[in-house]
Image (cartoon, coloured by chain):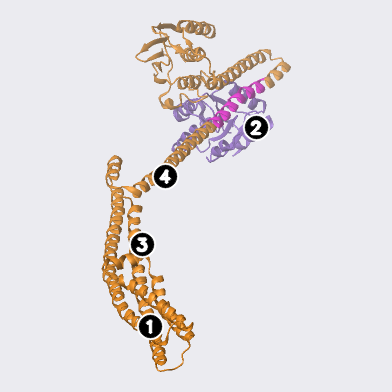
């Protein structure tokens, strides 16, 4: 049962109890009133008796005075009857004390008779003896009525007391019992709820227990509290997620900024170097022309040209690196053969004296979807590096490129027997502007960084295996959306 | 008078050429040696027997011009290794001047923490007379 219902019961019982008590008190005071009226009745009747006796003794009593007294007497039963209500009448009928009311009515009748007699005598319509007799009779009647009136009133009052007191006691006890029981019941429910909630049990078990053991307003309270908690937990979780997202974005941004700062430093430095050199050489070219040392001037001029080529290559490399981040072309089916041929043609004009043997193995059956520009740059940079750092002193220098597929991915592998990466610099391979061979100093040092950017974009992995015997670079790419 | 020897360590042959020529134009009288990497320079400096044989009093070089940005070991790595070598072998007369395109103050400060680094020259910034003065200061001590 709901707590409100239980409390309602207690309220109702208390109202009943209080009402009964008040009613009983009122009835008892009514009884006292009746006694009082009866006493007045007796008093006025005594006055009346005196007046009658005096009349009989020959004293002159005004009829007016008699009327006044009788009227006073008459008023008492009238007041009594006015005080009686339906409930009183009902009770008195049940306990057989209703004749008290009949006595009152009779008393009124007797008083009316007396009044009539007085009026009749006053008008001379009644003789003195009959008059006096009538008055005596009336007085006697009044007396009898008073006497007869007491008992039933007493009986009624005592009945009310006898019956109401136990009734009220019973209800009070019942009320006290119920209040005790219900308050224990309520506090037990609350304690049970506290107990269940304090248990360290899995959520589903707790929910079952709550369903089974808690009802009514407590259950509603728990539900509302839970929903409120849930929504504030969700809010907190969302906030936490947002915060950690912001944190990771911020750290990404910081990383990017650091990368940019480093890049700017290196780029500006590497761009500045060939310019400074060219400037210095130009100064000596002028001097040499003036002194007529044209051979020296020519050699230096050629060097300037080569420095400018280096600068150009660097700028192109930087642009490629920047573009690598931005490239968002559509994907095409890749024709590896054609890409490799294109690169091979360029290489043969860039390294006309190279003794490297070029080996190509393309065994991809299922079409591969990717951005052509990226694959082209990867292949170009891989092969250019292989040629650039080939070891012409070795007997059979070669550069080999293999493109093959595996389960779920495709691989590009470039092998050579060139100079290799030094062991100590393995971690720096993909850093920008890093070159490792002082005698092979041309080149931007950006090739590997460009390759790495493309590989990262395509979510691939690069593995490097390098020594003085040669280098093998393996690139694995997961197939994206292939046919 | 001691045989004045100067060593230029720079991976770029044009840079070495320019410095060598600038020294000559400034009237510096010295044997100018070149090495294109930190490692080959260290090898050279460690090989005392060979060095003495070839350059007598001119070995070790009294003045070394050192580039910072080089493939292999860079200028700072060289400084670290050279400082150890210097103590081991008592190359107290060898002095270094940094010679770099970098104008970063961090690089400048970092280099000067070594007591044998006497100067930090930015490439292309020195006139011949200034270069001559600096070199003379080193060799007059």
Give the spatial CA distance, label 4 vs label 2: 80 Å
Tell me the element at label 2: helix
Chain letter behind tag 4? A
Q: Residues within 10 Å of mark 1 (few under 14, many from 20)?
A: some
Residue A430 shows up from this direction: yes
Q: Nearer the viewer, mark 3 or mark 4?
A: 3
Q: CA distance from mark 3 to mark 4?
A: 38 Å
**Is tag 1's residue or tag 3's residue first in the polypeptide sequence?**
3
Q: CA distance from mark 2 to mark 1?
A: 166 Å
Residue B131: assigned label: 2
Gap between marks 1 and 3 measured at Cα: 54 Å
Label 4 vs label 2, nearer the camera: 4
**Tags 1 and 4 both on a single chain:** yes
Q: Where is residue A428 shown, x and y percent of the image? A: 46, 26
What mark, if any, has residue A228 been given in the picture?
Answer: 4
Q: Is residue A400 magenta?
A: no
Nearer the camera: disc 1 or disc 4: 1
Q: Nearer the viewer, residue A37 or B11?
A: A37
In the image, which residues are magenta? A259-281
Secondary structure found at label 4: helix
* Label pair 4/2, CB-CB below 8 angstroms: no
Q: Position of residue A55 (x, y in %)?
A: 42, 91
In this figure, which residue is indicated by the disc labeled 1? Answer: A134
């Amino acid at each position: 049962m709901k707590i409100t219902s239980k409390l309602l019961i207690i309220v109702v019982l208390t109202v009943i109890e209080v009402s009964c008590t008040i009613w009983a008190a009122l009835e008892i005071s009514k009884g006292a009133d009746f006694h009082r009226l009866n006493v007045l009745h007796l008093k006025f009747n005594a006055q009346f008796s005196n007046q009658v006796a005096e009349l009989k003794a020959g004293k002159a009593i005004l009829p007016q005075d008699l009327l006044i007294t009788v009227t006073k007497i008459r008023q008492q039963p009238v007041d009594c009857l006015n005080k009686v209500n339906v409930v009183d009448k009902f009770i008195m009928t049940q306990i057989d004390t209703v004749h008290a009311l009949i006595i009152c009515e009779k008393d009124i009748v007797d008083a009316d008779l007396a009044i009539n007699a007085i009026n009749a005598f006053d008008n001379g319509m009644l003789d003195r003896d009959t008059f006096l007799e009538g008055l005596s009779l009336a007085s006697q009647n009044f007396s009898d009525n008073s006497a007869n009136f007491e008992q039933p009133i007493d009986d009624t009052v005592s009945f009310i007391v006898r019956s109401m007191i136990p009734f009220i006691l019973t209800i009070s006890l019942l009320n006290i019992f119920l209040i005790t029981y219900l308050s224990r019941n309520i506090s037990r429910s609350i304690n049970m709820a506290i107990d269940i909630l304090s248990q360290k049990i899995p959520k589903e078990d707790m929910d079952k227990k709550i369903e089974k053991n808690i009802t009514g307003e407590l259950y509603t309270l728990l539900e509302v509290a839970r929903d409120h908690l849930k929504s504030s937990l969700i809010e907190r979780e969302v906030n936490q997620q947002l915060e950690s997202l912001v944190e990771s974005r911020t750290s990404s941004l910081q990383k990017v900024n650091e990368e940019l700062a480093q890049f700017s430093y290196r780029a500006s430095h590497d761009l500045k170097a060939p310019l400074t050199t060219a400037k210095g050489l130009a100064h000596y070219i002028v001097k040499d022309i003036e002194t007529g040392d044209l051979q020296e001037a020519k050699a230096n001029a050629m060097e300037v040209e080569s420095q400018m080529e280096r600068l150009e290559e660097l700028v192109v490399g930087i642009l490629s690196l920047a573009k690598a981040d931005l490239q968002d072309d559509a994907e095409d089916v890749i024709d590896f053969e054609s890409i490799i041929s294109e690169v091979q043609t360029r290489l043969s004009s860039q390294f006309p004296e190279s003794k490297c043997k070029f080996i190509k193995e393309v065994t991809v059956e299922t079409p591969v979807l990717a951005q052509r520009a990226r694959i082209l740059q990867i292949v170009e940079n891989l092969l250019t590096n292989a040629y650039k750092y080939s070891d012409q002193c070795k007997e059979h220098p070669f550069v080999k490129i293999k493109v093959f597929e595996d389960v779920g991915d495709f691989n590009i592998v470039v092998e050579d027997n060139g100079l290799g990466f030094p062991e100590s610099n393995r971690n720096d391979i993909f850093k920008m502007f890093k070159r490792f061979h002082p005698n092979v100093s041309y080149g931007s040092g950006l090739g590997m960084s460009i390759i790495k950017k493309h590989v990262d974009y395509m979510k691939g992995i690069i593995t490097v295996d390098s020594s003085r015997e040669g280098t093998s670079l393996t690139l694995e790419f997961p197939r994206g959306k292939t046919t | 008078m001691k045989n004045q020897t100067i060593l230029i360590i720079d991976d770029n042959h044009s840079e070495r050429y320019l410095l060598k020529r600038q020294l000559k134009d400034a009237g510096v009288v010295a044997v100018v040696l070149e090495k294109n990497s930190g490692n080959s320079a260290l090898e050279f400096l460690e090989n005392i027997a060979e060095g003495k044989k070839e350059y007598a009093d001119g070995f070790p070089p009294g003045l070394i011009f050192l580039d910072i940005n080089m493939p292999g070991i860079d200028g700072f790595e060289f400084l670290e290794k050279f400082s150890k070598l210097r103590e081991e072998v008592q190359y107290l007369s060898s002095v270094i001047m940094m010679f770099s395109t970098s104008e970063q103050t961090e690089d400048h400060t970092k280099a000067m923490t070594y007591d044998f680094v006497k100067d930090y020259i930015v490439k292309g910034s020195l006139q011949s007379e200034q270069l001559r003065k600096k070199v003379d200061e080193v060799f007059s001590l």
